[in-house]
Amino acid sequence: MSAAKTTRFDIKRSLIDTILAGLLSLIVFGPIVGVVLDGYSFNLEPKRVAMLVAVVMAGRFLLSLFMQTPKGQAILQGFEGGGSGVHVLAPDYKSRLRWIIPALIVIAIIFPIFANKYLLTVVILGLIYVLLGLGLNIVVGLAGLLDLGYVAFYAIGAYGLALGYQYLGLGFWTVLPLAAIAAALAGCILGFPVLRMHGDYLAIVTLGFGEIIRLVLNNWLSFTGGPNGMPVPSPTFMGLEFGRRAKDGGVPFHEFFGIDYNPNLKFLFIYIVLFLVVLAVLYIKHRLTRMPVGRAWEALREDEIACRSMGLNHVLVKLSAFTLGASTAGLAGVFFASYQGFVNPSSFTFFESALILAIVVLGGMGSTVGVVIAAFVLTVAPELLRSFSEYRVLLFGVLMVLMMIWRPRGLIRISRTGVTPRKGVAP
């Protein structure tokens, strides 16, 4: 009897869902598929619209019936509770990362041997967004501070290299730590006015900060070059340049080591240094999340009032999150400028902040591994699928909708290793 009850279909509910799906598909597909431009006029294609609407309605009807079966109900329950909360692992749990991380390091070492220039530049771009995602993950994922102007710190790092070279003659290695410090100071300055703000108000203020930085870079023609941008020097290794000919009569890298000239040496060098920096940031973030400051970030994210009632200084907790997240973006900006060889304000729009935030949300709020995977999925995949460039934004939107339904807490949710109670202590 119970089995018969669970398999009884609610046809009325299925029909209502089907009609609503048909209306939505008509609204979406009608203007796009049903109207075909022909010069200065247009032709209507009602048959194509009717076919698409019929397919959507049939699929929604079958899906509604399937979701009323025991198997469908089990899938729905998995959506509702499977990704919620923090997953506590067994005390003796051994993570698979102890094998995956060494394997990835070996692959990263072998990769440049077989990769061409295009693949090398695509992976460099992916690693840059991994850095950006890790930095924003501290602010949004761990501390729970919604930052929509994160691209401003990215721009500070990139323009730090360009301006340092233009006016002070500074190179890649000198600007790399200085850009991280400058971005950290900017994050600290941004943190002070927003200490009492939460949610939407915090997002609006940070969004305004990002736009202020972009407009300053765009309009200060005499200092930043405005929309024309600024050139960026190529990185060097112990003073050796990677070009065919060195400036000022110096010795280039390939002549000093007696090897054939390779135009990919610059990108290979950026890839190696960037990969080492990403590993260092991953290790530092891994340690910070297990230190008191990391626990303080998570306490602030869950409940600021409870966090303050336990004696935690919420001012220092917020400022530390903004500062460390901004410094990581400053490092990424230096690598982006060196990789591109040129910077201008159009590279630091709000869309970049939205993309970085999507990386954090889709990867999993607070999850390091999830952010790394999402960074490569959202940056490398569009580059490799350029034949579908017209549909990249559509695919991006579909991916986000599916993720919010399938894995609302991201690809990989936060997990904690359980603790074995000591003898004589009540559990």
Image (cartoon, helix red, strand yellow):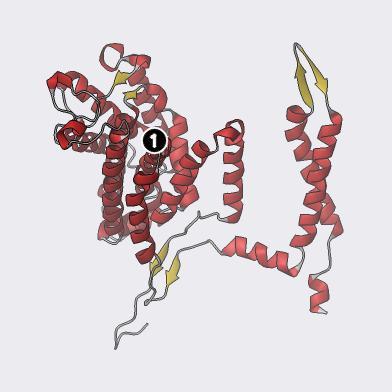
Three-letter amino acid code of the residue under disc 1: Lys
Q: Quadrant of the C terminus?
A: bottom left
Q: Along the line of sight, which residue is nearer the eye, 317 or 31?
A: 31
Instruction: Estimate the x, y position of residue 185 in percent, counting from the top left.
Output: 23, 36
The picture places residue 61, in percent across and down from the top left corner, at 81, 53
Q: Secondary structure at mark 1?
A: helix
Quadrant into which the N terminus falls? bottom right
The answer, for residue 114, to whether it is visible in the render is yes
Task: Answer above or below: position of 15 versus 188.
Answer: below
**Residue 208 versus residue 249: which sits nearer the camera?**
249
Residue topped by disc 1: 117
- Whether residue 367 is visible to the viewer of this picture, yes or no, is no
**Would residue 290 appear left or right of 237 to someone viewing this image?**
right
Residue 425 position by quadrant: bottom left
Asked if 342 appears above or below 3 in the picture, the reply is above
Identify which residue is drawn at 17% across, 37% down.
257
**Residue 336 in picture, x, y percent from top left:** 33, 33
Q: Quadrant of residue 338?
A: top left
Q: Is residue 204 left or right of residue 49?
A: left
The residue sitting at 82% across, 20% down in the picture is 43
Q: Is residue 427 left or right of residue 163?
A: right
